Image (cartoon, rainbow, N blue to C red):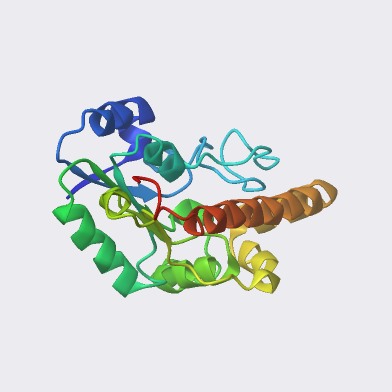
């Protein structure tokens, strides 16, 4: 398994490696900013988050790297958060290692630029809170299952407790600083962030409910 800083290598380079079809295992640590150059906003930055070049909060939805990789149809993809589920994390690592082709694991990685109010020593707990609140979702996509007539997409996250979503945003300075500087705009962006999270989770639920038993018949 090779760990890659997506922000440093760039999506284009990662896409070329994945599209090659080679048996390579890639671990992406998603910090949601350009961590290696000072915390600038990127396409992976979510709505409402404050970052360099997005002082008034990011206005558009973050990209879904996993969904983009799944469109190839021959790439193993997993989204994990070790602090939320070590079992799911280890299962994804084992499946990715065993998969005979490109595999991509995207791990949620709290960053110092997030400004965790509980402190960076609580980053594992923050990952757990992110999944429980619906901010981050766990899944695995194994193309080999489709050949067996099974759905290749498995949603590992339970139904989130959406009442915790806003509390989660308020646990990080990158969000609360927006409330202080732009209170009206923050209310709108935070509501949009929750709506986006629900939209993404519901799209994953639809994917997990598809019937593949007759696909190859």
Residue 119 relative to residue 3: left or right = right
- Compared with 194, 61 (above or below) is above
Give percent across and percent down for residue 211. 46, 55
Residue 8 percent coordinates (x, y): 33, 34
Residue appearing at x 53%, y 54% in the figure: 204
Measured as percent of width and height from the top left, residue 3 is found at: 23, 47
Decide if residue 105 is in sight here: no
Which residue is the extreme one toward the right? 184
Closest to the observer: 49 or 100? Answer: 100
Side of 48 where 68 appears, left or right: left
Q: Quick check: 111 above or below 118?
A: above
For the point 68% across and 57% down, which residue is it? 194
- Work out whether residue 59 can be spotted: yes
Q: Quadrant of residue 70?
A: top left
User: Foreground residue, 4 or 173?
Assistant: 4
Q: Is residue 6 above or below residue 199?
A: above
Q: How many marks?
A: 0
Q: Residue at x 54, y 37 (%)?
A: 41
């Amino acid at each position: 398994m090779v760990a890659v800083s997506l922000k440093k290598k760039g999506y284009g380079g990662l896409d070329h490696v994945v599209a090659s079809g080679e048996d390579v295992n890639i671990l992406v640590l998603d910090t949601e900013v350009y961590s290696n150059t000072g915390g600038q906003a990127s396409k992976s930055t979510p709505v409402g988050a404050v970052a360099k070049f997005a002082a008034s909060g990011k206005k558009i939805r973050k990209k879904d790297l996993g969904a983009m990789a799944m469109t190839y149809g021959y790439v193993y993809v997993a989204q994990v958060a070790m602090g939320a589920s070590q079992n799911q994390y280890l299962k994804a690592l084992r499946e990715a290692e065993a998969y005979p082709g490109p595999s991509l694991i995207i791990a949620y990685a709290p960053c110092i630029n997030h400004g965790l109010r509980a402190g960076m020593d609580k980053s594992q707990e923050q990952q757990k809170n992110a999944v429980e609140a619906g901010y981050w979702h766990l899944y695995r996509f194994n193309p080999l299952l489709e050949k067996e007539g099974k759905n290749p997409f498995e949603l590992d996250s339970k139904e989130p407790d959406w009442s915790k979503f806003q509390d989660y945003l308020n646990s990080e300075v990158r969000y609360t600083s927006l409330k202080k500087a732009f209170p009206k705009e923050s209310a709108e962006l935070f509501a949009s962030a929750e709506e986006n999270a629900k939209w993404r989770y519901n799209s994953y639920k639809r994917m997990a409910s598809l019937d593949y038993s007759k696909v190859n018949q």
